[in-house]
Image (tube, rainbow, N blue to C red):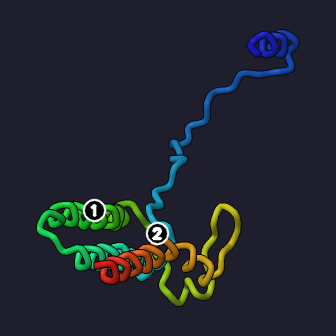
Amino acid sequence: MSHIVHDLLARGDARIVEQPDIAPRHQVEADRNFGLPTALYGATVAGYLGFLLVVGSAFANPVLAIPMAIFVVFIVAGFGIPAIWTRLAGNASEPQTLGEFEQRGIMTHTGRLTARDATIQVLILPVLLVIWGLAVAVIAAVVA
């Protein structure tokens, strides 16, 4: 590469200029928001905590108190810390309201999703976990 540059300089086809006096532009913009409505995150947390509530009440045992408390702390931290992160200084983006989400949907890596499709993708795991917890609780109640 440097050999080509030297040849261009020697032939007079290239010229050396001073670097322009421009303030550096930051390449990374602080967008700490996923664009989904806050209600979807709340429903996701409710699903995870609902699973723990169902399983914890079905298999109520003093030995499970500490593991259940640890799970609750992890879930709250897993959603609470990013919620705080989105409110840091320098973050100009805001989550969509439910009306905006219904109207526009959300852009993903693979294309635009409607609000219904995005909601299904976000809530499928928490809903299945609650259903699984209820099924396990029913099975445990029938067997006992």
Q: Secondary structure at mark 1?
A: helix
What label does residue 37 carry, if any?
A: none
First along the sequence among labels 1 and 2: 1
Disc 2 marks a residue whose amino acid type is Ser
Task: Pick the residue in front: 31 or 81.
Answer: 81
* Residue 87 coordinates in the image, percent (x, y): 33, 67
Q: In the picture, which quadrant includes the C terminus?
A: bottom left
* Residue 107 coordinates in the image, percent (x, y): 63, 70
Task: Pick the residue in front: 44 or 136.
Answer: 136
Cα–Cα gap, marks 1 and 2: 22 Å
Q: In the picture, which quadrant includes the N terminus?
A: top right
Q: On the rendered structure, is 69 left or right of 115?
A: left
Relative vertical location of residue 25 with respect to residue 73 in this rendering, above or below: above
Name of the residue lying farthest toward the front:
143
Disc 1 marks a residue whose amino acid type is Ala
Quarter occupied by residue 120 = bottom right
* Residue 74 coordinates in the image, percent (x, y): 28, 61
- The answer to whether residue 41 shows anywhere in this view is no
Residue at image mark 2: 93
Give me the residue at 35% from left, 62% from top: 82
Task: Pick the residue in front: 13 or 92.
Answer: 92
Numbered disc in front, either 1 or 2: 1
Residue at image mark 1: 77
Q: On the rendered structure, is 101 left or right of 70?
A: right
Q: How many marks?
A: 2
Q: On the rendered structure, is 24 left or right of 116?
A: left
Relative vertical location of residue 21 with respect to residue 89 in this rendering, above or below: above
* Residue 92 coordinates in the image, percent (x, y): 44, 67
Quarter occupied by residue 4 = top right
Give me the residue at 38% from left, 75% from top: 136
Task: Pick the residue in front: 106 or 44.
Answer: 44
